[in-house]
Amino acid sequence: MRIFKITIFLLASFLVGCQSSIKKAEKESSQQNESKRPNILIILADDMGYGDIGVYGSEISTPNIDQLANEGIQFTNFHVGAACSPTRTMLMTGVDNHRAGIGNLVEIQADNQFGKPGYEGYLNNDVVSIATRLKDGGYHTYMTGKWHLGKSKTTIPYARGFERSFALMESGADNWVEQPYLPLNDKVHYFEDNKQVSLPTENYFSSDYYTDKIMSYIDSNKGDEKPFFAYVSYQAVHYPHQAPKSFIDKYNGVYDNGWEEIRTRRLKKQKELGIVSQSVELNFENSATSVSGWKLSDWESLSEEEKLFNARRMQAYAGMADNMDYNIGRLLQHLQDIGEYNNTLIIFLSDNGADPNQLPLNPAFKSWYKEKYQYSSFEDYKEDYNAVGQKGSYSDYGPNWAAASNTPNSYYKMFSTEGGLRVPFIAWYPKLLKAGKVTNQFAFVKDIAPTLLEIAGIENSGSTYKGKKIFPITGTSMWSAMKEEVTVHADEEIIGFELAGSRAVFKGDYKLVFNPRTKGTGQWELYNIVKDPSEMNNLVADFPELVDELSKAYHIYQKENGVIPVPDDYDVLKQLVKNSKRGKSH
């Protein structure tokens, strides 16, 4: 009996010791997980309008992006550049695009801007990319998708801090095959790391492929305990609007009643969600301008054939956005499967507002599109609207649907209005961010880089990096504002922006905006963008002192950042045609 009792005692002691060891190991593991720096994932959509996501009022199915918003923080007053590469420049550096090398889109760069500092047409060496900073700070760095910040061996992602990358160098491309979408380019260039490569000839679709690649890069080092920075830059929903047919067919009937109904429904939902004021109205007059050649159509004025065609065009756009969200879901599930999901800060945003352009209608480009695409105009599709968005098709959707995408904001990409500059922004990190937070405070794309540095615990080096003089980051970290009820920018802080003659100056709830006569009035206009994001009530006459202050502030911004104004007769489309002939793309 005594031996039995001793055995029981020893067994009990052993079990208690095991439990203690297990608890100690669990505690140590928990402490390690808590102390491990977070992974960072940035997901960038291309030309996606403010109202194109479910949590921003859309009928398009985006459950994975919506989940990130519902479990994280949603910004409703976030601003970027008016076009892709200026935004990407500021995203990658935290520095104004005029300082960092993309003072204007190289495709439309004015004659007087070529060869000038800040207008190199690629991310220059006066700035350091966030990828370089994170890589030097102990992160793995991965990138897939559209780069559009240079395509020489010294300016590709691999040369600017990305350890692994598969990237498209140009502003866009066909999503099914290796083919340019723009007459400016004879071909498109893809690089994997530091080698130029070709796309697969079978089973390729851009969003699917970029997602597969980023998952493979993440997996390549998943056992070494180092955090990663992953940047997925989808071509969706930049034109050509293309998607697998099942995603397009999913929206059969949804757009049959036209763009006015969709805009009205979206605004109603936005008010229900509380992301815009109940007093906001749709600005039907200020959504296009006759000067720019864009005139909104009355849906009921279209023929039945035109209605069918236009509904299918929007279906292709919706299907492309839906497919992107599906791929985001695949990526999020993969992070869960490998145990990295809950330790990853995820940021989703768009690079600018919706694009109204219809390049195949441009007389200078018609023959090029006819040669490259089997379907590129209304006449081509008449026999088979199901071809819209499929291989061999070039699909855009024009100013009417672009206005719906930007609900409730007016105008479009390339404008310094809210339709060009205000985009969705969502951040998710369950360890530190409160679920379901919605904020209407102003923030700007330059703020992302310093935010990532703070999260990663990496010092902002100021005006030097490793002994080399650089332009310092001028954005402000958003991290405290994401976690607590504090503002990113003080009400008295002024932030400027310029692109191709369009200008904006932000201060508190107000924005002073100028769009040249080719796109707008050619006069300074003042709006309260919190109360009036559709920019219907010009306040210039009501606040002359504020107008004077902000116009002076713009000229200071212009001088400090080396902005070279475009000529008075500058026209974006004419310059695009001219540059396509001169071969000045870098």
Image (spheres, rainbow, N blue to C red):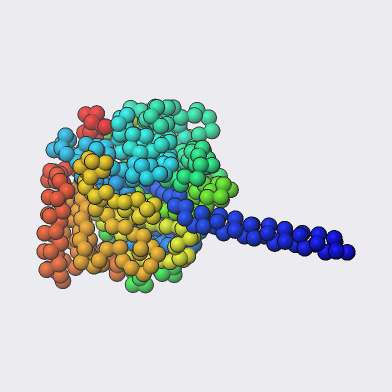
In the drawing, does residue 575 fall left or right of residue 244? left
Q: Nearer the viewer, residue 156 or 221?
A: 221
On the image, the x and y values in percent for residue 74 come to 41, 62
**What residue is at 39 percent from the left and 27 percent from the top?**
196
In the drawing, does residue 249 fall left or right of residue 183? right
Q: Residue furthest right?
A: 1
Examine the image and state in which quarter residue 233 appears. Answer: top left
Note whether residue 358 is visible.
Answer: no
Q: Nearer the viewer, residue 523 or 219?
A: 219
Q: Nearer the viewer, residue 517 or 7?
A: 7
On the image, the x and y values in percent for residue 493 come to 21, 63
**What residue is at 51 percent from the left and 54 percent from the top?**
32
In what quadrant of the picture does the N terminus appear?
A: bottom right
On the image, the x and y values in percent for residue 348 come to 42, 53
Q: Nearer the viewer, residue 179 or 519?
A: 179
Note whether residue 196 is visible.
Answer: yes
Examine the image and state in which quarter residue 24 appears. Answer: bottom right
Check the image and report above or below for 184 versus 242.
above
**What residue is at 47 percent from the left and 65 percent from the top?**
435
**What residue is at 36 percent from the left and 69 percent from the top?**
485
Q: How many marks?
A: 0
On the image, the x and y values in percent for residue 432 come to 45, 62
Check the image and report above or below for 44 versus 20.
above
In what quadrant of the picture does the C terminus appear?
A: top left
Q: Residue furthest front?
A: 2
Check the image and report above or below for 399 versus 546.
above
